Image: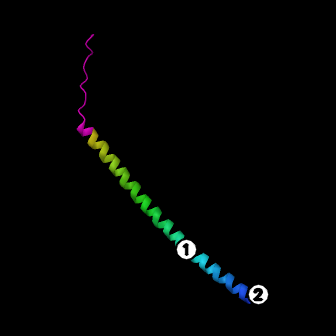
Protein backbone atom coordinates (compact mmCIF):
# COMPACT_ATOMS: atom_id res chain seq x y z
CA UNK A 1 0.00 0.00 0.00
CA UNK A 2 1.47 3.30 -1.04
CA UNK A 3 1.78 6.32 1.21
CA UNK A 4 -0.63 8.26 -0.98
CA UNK A 5 -3.29 5.54 -0.65
CA UNK A 6 -2.83 5.42 3.14
CA UNK A 7 -3.14 9.20 3.42
CA UNK A 8 -6.28 9.17 1.27
CA UNK A 9 -7.83 6.45 3.44
CA UNK A 10 -6.93 8.39 6.60
CA UNK A 11 -8.49 11.55 5.16
CA UNK A 12 -11.68 9.64 4.32
CA UNK A 13 -11.83 8.14 7.82
CA UNK A 14 -11.25 11.58 9.36
CA UNK A 15 -14.02 13.08 7.25
CA UNK A 16 -16.46 10.38 8.40
CA UNK A 17 -15.45 10.88 12.03
CA UNK A 18 -15.83 14.64 11.74
CA UNK A 19 -19.30 14.20 10.25
CA UNK A 20 -20.27 11.81 13.06
CA UNK A 21 -19.03 14.22 15.74
CA UNK A 22 -21.02 17.07 14.18
CA UNK A 23 -24.17 14.93 14.08
CA UNK A 24 -23.72 13.91 17.72
CA UNK A 25 -23.11 17.50 18.73
CA UNK A 26 -26.30 18.74 17.13
CA UNK A 27 -28.29 15.87 18.60
CA UNK A 28 -26.95 16.69 22.08
CA UNK A 29 -27.90 20.34 21.62
CA UNK A 30 -31.43 19.33 20.59
CA UNK A 31 -31.71 17.00 23.58
CA UNK A 32 -30.54 19.79 25.88
CA UNK A 33 -33.33 22.01 24.57
CA UNK A 34 -35.87 19.22 25.04
CA UNK A 35 -34.66 18.66 28.62
CA UNK A 36 -34.99 22.37 29.41
CA UNK A 37 -38.54 22.39 28.01
CA UNK A 38 -39.46 19.28 30.00
CA UNK A 39 -38.02 20.77 33.20
CA UNK A 40 -40.09 23.93 32.75
CA UNK A 41 -43.21 21.86 32.11
CA UNK A 42 -42.53 19.68 35.14
CA UNK A 43 -42.04 22.73 37.39
CA UNK A 44 -45.31 24.22 36.15
CA UNK A 45 -47.15 20.94 36.75
CA UNK A 46 -45.73 20.60 40.25
CA UNK A 47 -46.75 24.15 41.06
CA UNK A 48 -50.25 23.54 39.71
CA UNK A 49 -50.56 20.30 41.69
CA UNK A 50 -49.50 22.07 44.90
CA UNK A 51 -52.06 24.80 44.29
CA UNK A 52 -54.80 22.23 43.65
CA UNK A 53 -53.89 20.29 46.79
CA UNK A 54 -53.93 23.46 48.84
CA UNK A 55 -57.34 24.50 47.56
CA UNK A 56 -58.86 21.00 47.85
CA UNK A 57 -57.69 20.26 51.39
CA UNK A 58 -59.82 21.88 54.08
CA UNK A 59 -57.79 23.76 56.63
CA UNK A 60 -58.05 22.55 60.18
CA UNK A 61 -59.58 25.02 62.57
CA UNK A 62 -57.38 26.17 65.38
CA UNK A 63 -59.16 25.25 68.57
CA UNK A 64 -58.15 24.83 72.17
CA UNK A 65 -57.47 21.31 73.29
CA UNK A 66 -60.22 19.86 75.48
CA UNK A 67 -58.10 19.92 78.66
CA UNK A 68 -58.10 23.78 78.86
Depth check: give the residue in front, 67 or 22.
22
* Residue marked by disc 1: 22
- Tell us which disc is closer to us: 1 or 2: 2
Residue 1 placement, left or right of 20:
right
Q: Residues within 10 Å of mark 2 (few under 14, many from 20)?
A: few
Q: Is residue 50 above or below residue 2?
A: above
Residue 5 is situated, as x and y percent measured from the top left of the image, at: 71, 88
Residue 32 is situated, as x and y percent measured from the top left of the image, at: 47, 62
Magenta span: 54-68
Which image quarter is the C terminus in? Answer: top left
Residue at point 73%, 89% (across, down): 4
* Residue marked by disc 2: 3
Mark seen at residue 52:
none
Q: Is residue 35 above or below residue 63?
A: below
Residue 39 is situated, as x and y percent measured from the top left of the image, at: 41, 54
Of callouts 1 and 2, which one flags the residue occurring earlier in the amino acid sequence? 2
Amino acid sequence: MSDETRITELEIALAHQTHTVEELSSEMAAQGQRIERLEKTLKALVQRLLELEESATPRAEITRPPHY
